[in-house]
Amino acid sequence: MAALGIATSGGNWFSALALGVTLLKCLLIPTYHSTDFEVHRNWLAITHSLPVSQWYYEETSEWTLDYPPFFAWFEYALSHVAKYFDQEMLNVHNLNYASSKTLLFQRFSVIFTDILFVYAVHECCKCIDGKKAGKELTEKPKFILSVLLLWNFGLLIVDHIHFQYNGFLMGLMLLSIARLFQKRHMEGALLFAVLLHFKHIYLYVAPAYGIYLLRSYCFTANKPEPAASSLFPTLPFQAGPLPCILGSKLLGFVQCFGQSAVCHRLLSVGKAGDASIFLILTTTGHYSLFPLLFTAPELPIKILLMLLFTIYSISSLKTLFRKEKPLFNWMETFYLLGLGPLEVFCEFVFPFTSWKLKYSFLPLLLTSAYCAVGITYAWFRLYVSVLTDPPVSKTKKQ
């Protein structure tokens, strides 16, 4: 903590935040991992030991390679580092292989590739309007946004406990958005095209990119490009393509939540209304991820990390918008507080009831239904905001 204080006082606060969360990720290395750990180990083995022509046909394991080609080559590149840790992990027939060296390599590969995410967050923070900046570092929008992104609770538990590479992929997404902010449209389009070849789930964002690029780049070749605020006037600090991107992300609560919430954090530091939507969406969505970590040792970890992140999110955004109306109305406050009793029932009461054997699915059902209400409500408010907010003055400087 002393080192963190020295770094922040010296102006290197972003590096301190990135280093701090990296150390936390290292502490999570011994925690539970899901079947996705074996999925990616198998993909390492497939791409390392078989010719390219067989990568998508290998069926020794049930976890066949089903991501686009760039991710397959990504696994191929990782496999050439993996062989120096434990050659046996690259054997296609070693199903469910999880030696200590394999665990270390897989965990560190996620941590290392998160470098792209850290760089993308840094680039996005450059695009933030600092007019709301307070005197204290912790009140500055760039600092708040950096914490909300780098210390993203969802990415921490999904990538560094459950096990996936979402941080690396979100890095490509955020870097693409940052390039659009910076009017580097071709780079932004290229990065998004690369992202699609890594993970096809991002395809539903493609129409938003297409419409935005047509309007802000293709149709303005012989005249000055319009400011992003004039194209999408309802969002804060010249949000550019984000309304379309967010608008295309309505479906798929748990799987797509992390991606949507990360993009929405770009809005949360610009306007009180967007901050309110962000807090409802991120708090509810993060809680919806709890069933992914169902083992007892991870229970205090997920509760503590979510509490810390949620308390910081609410307190920092309340401070940022302290001169405006409260971020939540009574109904929203009541709903969010209801997550506490729900967690108590699911984790501490239900296991000791007679329903456990016959209705083992009940905690998951209650969690899914309760969170679905909050996430749907947040998206409804976002659409209303996009469609009804007054336009930003065209004379306003970016």
Image (tube, helix red, strand yellow):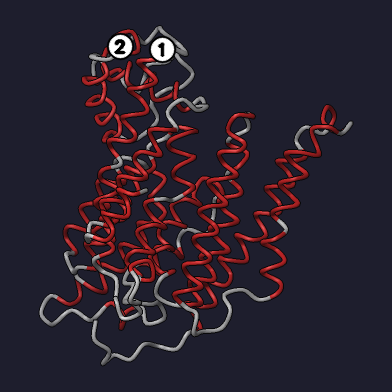
Question: Badges 1 and 2: C-beta atoms under 8 Å apart?
Answer: yes
User: Quick one: 281 or 222, which is closer to the camera?
Assistant: 281
Residue 263 position, x and y percent, is: 40, 60
Is 293 placed above or below 184 here? above
Q: Compare marks 1 and 2 and give the one earlier in the sequence.
A: 2
Q: Measure the alpha-carbon separation of dots 1 and 2.
A: 8 Å
Q: Which mark is residue 86?
A: 2
Question: Dot 1: few (<14), some (14–19), or many (≥20) neighbours within 10 Å?
Answer: few
**Amino acid marked by disc 1:** Ser
Side of 32 relative to 240 (left or right): right
Side of 280 relative to 357 (left or right): left
Is 33 placed above or below 349 here? above
Residue 116 position, x and y percent, is: 25, 45
Side of 7 relative to 165 (left or right): left
| Element at label 1 | loop
Instruction: Tell me the quadrant of the picture where the C terminus can be found.
Output: bottom left
Residue at (29% x, 61% y) in the render: 177
User: Quick one: 148 or 59, which is closer to the camera?
Assistant: 148
Residue at (57% x, 72% y) in the render: 381
Residue at (26% x, 43% y) in the render: 115
**Amino acid marked by disc 2:** Asp
Q: Write down the quadrant of residue 220 in the picture.
A: bottom left
Q: Residue furthest left?
A: 222
Q: What residue is pinned by disc 1?
A: 99
